[in-house]
Image (tube, rainbow, N blue to C red):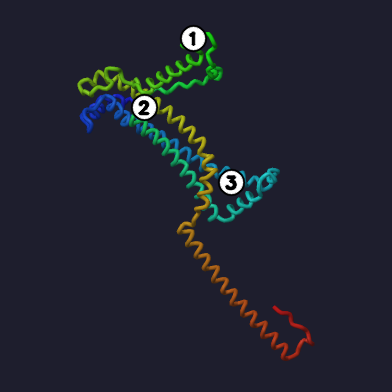
Amino acid sequence: PTQEELNGLLTAAIRCGGTGVHGHQRWEDVASKLMLSVSFEPLRRRVRYVAARVVWVLKQQKETVSEWMSALAGGPASRLYSPLFSQHMEILRTYPIVRDLVFSAYDRAAAAIGEQVLKNLEGTLVAACINPDIMLRPSTEPDLDPTKVAPPAPAPPAPGTKAGAATPSSRASTEQRRRVTCEMKRRSGKSGGLPLELQDRVFEPAEAQKTMPHVEAKLCRAFAVLAHVLANQAFAFADTSLACLCHRRVDEAMTTIEFSPEQSRALAQRHEELEATAKHVEQRLLGVKKCISALRSELRNQGGLGGAVVPRA
């Protein structure tokens, strides 16, 4: 958040306090409202910028692919790929309508990828701003040390040993129970953003001046954690967007290609012109055939050309 927004936290906290549907507002509720009002818009602008950049990069790929397809026509790499690439590129260059349809379908597929990335990132942003305590809770600590092996199966007690003596398997089981108990306490406890004297306490406007530094520290920490989470997710989604575009989105976009109203009217007009030309040619051909038939019959009647045979048309 900007310094101006941080300076206005006291006024914003007093506005967010008061009595709600479920009774008096607590400091945790006020902190959550401040997180939503202060941090949501700056992070949302950054998320939208990331989605727009993803769409822009994907749209630029069609020019790169077109240049690559053009280079396959005459070169040593032409034998490594299908000859349809160069043929399709020639069609795109020859017919502007086909080029516009294919490129428009590709742009729509890239825009759909950007919308999906934006939807995923905004979902994480809204959830974290509504309840920052969940985001700030400590995570579990899994044991990723490969040197530690699982304890062996318990062996039957040797003769002469006491039944209640501790075995390695029992000690390992006790350690596992203790670790699980500690993890449950850490995960179910408070996030630690607010001091103990403010946790589960009703908001009082008279005490806001003294307690706002603690709330500001919690908001800054939550903002940093959320920005880090969104940056990681944005990198992951941007990395997989190209694969998703190539595997599914492009095929779906190409199968739904349709002419625009202007293109449909232009094609209909061109079709009418060609039909009129074809009818005119058929009429002229019919007239030529009638003339040939008349000439042939006249030559037969006169027995001309010394018995020569008139070729058929």
Residue 303, labelled with which disc? Answer: none
> Mark 1, residues whose alpha carbon is within 10 Å: few (<14), some, or many (≥20)?
few
Residue that badge 1 annotates: 162
Q: In the rendered structure, which amino acid carries the disc numbered 3?
A: Ser
Depth check: give the residue in front, 259 or 283: 259
Residue 207, by quadrant, is top left
| Residue that carries the numbered disc 3 in the rendered image | 66
Label 2 sits on what residue type? Ile
Residue sitting at 55 percent across and 45 percent down? 62
Of label 3 and label 1, which has the lower sequence position? 3
Q: Quadrant of the N terminus?
A: top left
Which residue does the image show at 49% across and 36% down from the upper left?
238
Residue 158 placement: quadrant:
top right
- 250 left or right of 184? right
Residue position marked by numbered label 2 in the rendering = 134
**Which element is circle 2 on?**
helix
Q: Earlier in the sequence, mark 3 or mark 2?
A: 3
**Left or right side of 115 for 3:** left
- State the image coordinates of residue 43 (x, y, percent, origin top left): 38, 32
Is residue 96 placed above or below 233 in the rendered structure? below
User: Which residue lies at the image location 62% right of the left edge and 77% below the top edge?
Assistant: 285
Determine whether, in the image, residue 185 is placed left or right of residue 260: left
The secondary element bearing badge 3 is classed as helix
